[in-house]
Amino acid sequence: MKKLLTIFCLFICLNGFGQTQNISLLSPIDESQIQVSYPFFSWTTISNTSQGLGDVFYKFKLVEIYEGQLPTYALQNNVSIYEEEITNSSSLLYPILAPEIQNCKSYVWHIIAEED
């Protein structure tokens, strides 16, 4: 059976780095339809401008969007399917041991960055 699901992404403005920075979510792009069970997620990096030192931690979150919901509402109100904290990397291959992404469903993902 062919997997077909829609991925939405949100752009997150960051605080706490000495200035506001934007992360651009690169892949999968907004409203893309993908046919893989374990997608590859990537985003632009940010620099730790408050000190210039230390690690940047990215918090990845994936949430299912239920029928009739907007992606922003789903992200704020639905239980996440998968979350992971990533250090100093701007990509994530969805893990095989994570809950399976289901056929014909919609999901939203986002990234929040924090400094060490």
Image: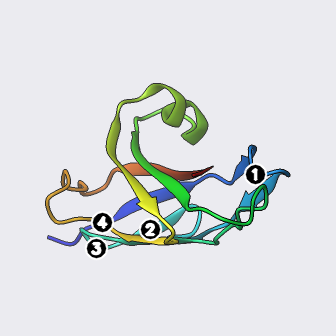
Which mark is on residue 36? 3
Residue visible at 49% across and 72% down in the picture: 89
Q: Nearer the viewer, mark 2 or mark 4?
A: 4
Q: Nearer the viewer, mark 1 or mark 3?
A: 1
Q: Position of residue 25 (x, y in %)?
A: 61, 65
Q: Nearer the viewer, residue 57 or 23?
A: 57
Amino acid type of the residue that numbered disc 1 sits on in the rendered structure: Phe
Q: Secondary structure at mark 2?
A: strand
Q: Secondary structure at mark 3?
A: loop
Judge whether 73 appears above or below 97 on screen: above
Contact flag, marks 2 and 4 (Cβ < 8 Å): no
Q: Nearer the viewer, mark 2 or mark 3?
A: 3
**How far apart in space, not on screen, are marks 4 and 1 (Cα)?**
27 Å
* Location of residue 48 (image quadrant): bottom right
Amino acid type of the residue that numbered disc 4 sits on in the rendered structure: Tyr
Q: Which residue is mark 4?
A: 94
Q: Residues within 10 Å of mark 1 (few under 14, many from 20)?
A: some
Which mark is on residue 17? 1
Q: Earlier in the sequence, mark 1 or mark 3?
A: 1
**How far apart in space, not on screen, are marks 2 and 3 (Cα)?**
10 Å
Q: Furthest residue to the right?
A: 19
Residue visible at 46% across and 72% down in the picture: 91
Contact flag, marks 2 and 3 (Cβ < 8 Å): no
Q: Earlier in the sequence, mark 3 or mark 4?
A: 3
Residue visible at 78% across and 61% down in the picture: 49
* Location of residue 103 (image quadrant): bottom left
Q: Which residue is mark 2?
A: 33
Q: Position of residue 60 (x, y in %)?
A: 45, 53
Residue visible at 57% across and 56% down in the picture: 9
**How far apart in space, not on screen, are marks 1 and 3 (Cα)?**
35 Å
